[in-house]
Amino acid sequence: MLIADAGTRRRAHVPSRLGRSIRRNLTAYGFLCAALACFAVFAWYPMVRTFILSFQQTNLIDPPTWVGLDNFRTVVDDPAFGEAWLNTLEFTVLALLCGYVVPFGIAIVLNELRHARAYLRFVVYLPVMLPPIVSVLMFRWFFDPGPGLFNQILGVVGIPPLAWLDSTSTALISLVIVSTWMNLGSGTLIYLAALQNIPGELYEAAELDGAGVWRRIRHVTIPQTKLILLLMLMLQIVATMQVFIEPFMLTLGGPENATLTVAYLMYQYAFVYGGNYGAGGALGLMLMIVLLAFAAVQLRLNRQDRP
Amino acid sequence: MQSNRRALALLLIAGLAGPTACGTSSTPAAKTTEAGKVTIKVSCQPAKSDPRNRKVWDDDVAAFQKLHPNVTVESTDQQPCFDPKTFGPKLAGGQMETVFRVPVTNTQDVISKGQALDISGLTGEVKNFADFSPAVMAPYSAGGKVYGIPTSTYSVGLVYNRKLFTQAGLDPNMPPKTWAEVREAAKKIAGIGAGFVGYGEYSGGNTGGWHFNQAIYGRGGEMVTPDGKQAAFNSPEGKAVLQFLKDLRWSDNSTGTKLLVGWESLMQAMGSGKTGMMLGAPDVVPDLVNKFGGQIADYGIAPFPEAKASLSGGEGFMINPKATPEEAKAGLQWVDFYWTTPGQGAFNYERAKTIGNPVGLPNNSLFGDSPSGKKIAELQKQHATLPVENFSPFVEGSAAVPPKLEPPKAQELYAILDVAMSAVLSRKDADVDKLLTDAESKANAVLAKS
């Protein structure tokens, strides 16, 4: 008993590990406060509310009622559910093929250039500075099956016009083109920064060993930028799976649901189908779980890959 | 590590508890103050970019407050007055007006969700309430109770470009009466030259399904079975709707090559003066002129070809369910003052003419042949500024066409039917029967949950 009392007294005087940690990092926590408050209000709180909402039904007047998994059943039973996921996955794969390889290639070319580097970097980055809505509206004219720019160009080289957004076979790839163009600048700039960190001696050594351009890219550039490449892969998958602006502004999910994506279907539940926020939240939660699972796998693979 | 987790957990709990507490409290749209004074918030004030109509509105608000000294009116100028995208958030955030506008296409949804006040005991505040026909009141009623006051109503017709009719060698005073005549006229208009479209039709963003509904009702078909549990559009009438469009697109090439997705797309096409015909209610015409650059003299309205029924169109006002009885009463007094009394507010055609507003649009079937209806028709005729003779085929041909409400789960059904509409307009090999069968099974899955 005495021993126990002594122990309690000792604990009362010795600051806990949490207390010590807080005291030691007080200034840092102070600086973090504003950022944490922003995250809490604009990211975590909506996420928690969405989680709660996905198990509720609400008319936004009376208190919400708990409906268990009903919203998830509504979403899964929706005939558009499968189409939306398939389109989203197809868009993601296509967007990765274009949006991952093209900026990396452009970054390598820009890195090798000796003249007009600043100008060309500006030109490549320019689309990022345009508001997405402006870019998308511009592409609406480019894709016009009548006097649109793309069909005029095809006409010049003797290729018959395409329906672009108006055909099930070309609508999704048209959206990929828009997305790639809009995001090209950011990706290129990040790859360029990574490329410039590669020590020049590595290339010199490779050249002395008789390595050509492709071998230098394969054995020097790619291994040296691997971390950035993996990070960008994850970020791009997370971003492209949430594609919304392109179908919302250009196709409204058509033709024949060929461009209906998960994010656009969420929007329809919440704002088109008479305010079914619960179903929208349920679908949002599903998408978040898929993305989290993917990110977790990616991070684990990265960790295993490190020396 | 554990300490960090604890801190994060505390933060999350604080974050959750704080805003949740905020979220459950709500600010009523109106305030009842001391000694019977009441403040109401009303929607649809004209925007600042429209100073003439805004001033007229403000003058009317002042006149109303003089007439009802206990009521203070606060106006909101969100445009459009009703937007499904902001409706829910406004309700949730306590920002919804005491008196808010709802298009007839949304009234039943709003009522079924308990988002409008039962005003059955207050209808006496609208003096000419008895003049509304039961058909006009149907979308605003449910279970024998009244939830709204209609302020405009119209049926669907065929909006056409008279100038293009003349250019194509057609008589603009003899618009098509049958679908066969529509097809022939479309072919001739498309034949004027490159870029001319005979008949424009929607195919996406739920507008395709919406126009499918208009077309199938007009042809005498149904969207759902009487109990609302199953789709009924896989019928001869439904097939006729799709086959007609497919023929126009692929046999006649008279619908243009571009898919029209979203409300603005067909309006832009029609406003550009290169599209000959479209399905639409009379309210399409002022929009074509004011928002899409059309010329008022160019447009005529014909009755829906071979019409058996018409999808109801129009708008009305409802009362915020959080309103107190005093606020609800004051809100309905405002509706009576501004929106439903002949010669006043929205029906003050003499003033509308003075400030250059269009008068003469055939959307006054609100009160039918009742005294209010007759008075409004008389005033409209007296002060008409629009070429009313261009609308006379519609007025004469549409009076006997019965209005019909949207089906349950309308927006979900429209999204499903968008697929069929976009298919016949974008694929030459589209199989009408298969499209309707696919749509039917999808619709049945949706309706089974209603």
Image: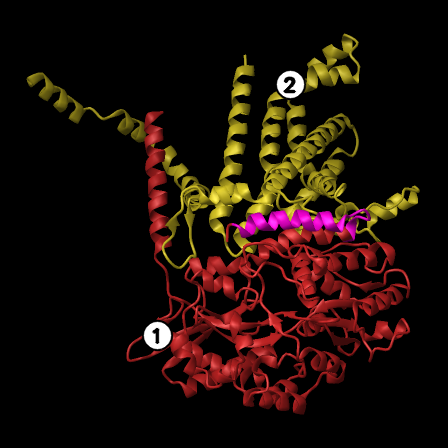
Chain colours: A yellow, B red
> Looking at this view, is A52 or A107 the one in front?
A52
The N terminus of chain B lies in which quarter of the figure? top left
Numbered mark located on residue B325 in the image: 1
Residues at marks 1 and 2, CA–CA distance in whole angstroms? 72 Å
Q: Position of residue A169 (x, y in %)?
A: 76, 41
> Looking at this view, is A41 or A301 the one in front?
A301
Q: Secondary structure at mark 1?
A: helix
**Amino acid type of disc 2?**
Gln
Q: Is residue A35 above or below residue B125?
A: above
Residue B93 seen from this side: yes
Q: Residues within 10 Å of mark 1 (few under 14, many from 20)?
A: some
Q: Nearer the viewer, mark 1 or mark 2?
A: 1
Residue A251 seen from this side: no
Residue placed at 66% from the left, 59% from the top? B207
Q: Which residues are magenta?
A: B425-448
Q: Position of residue B439 (x, y in %)?
A: 65, 49
Q: Secondary structure at mark 2?
A: helix
Q: Chain of mark 2?
A: A
Q: Position of residue B293 (x, y in %)?
A: 75, 70
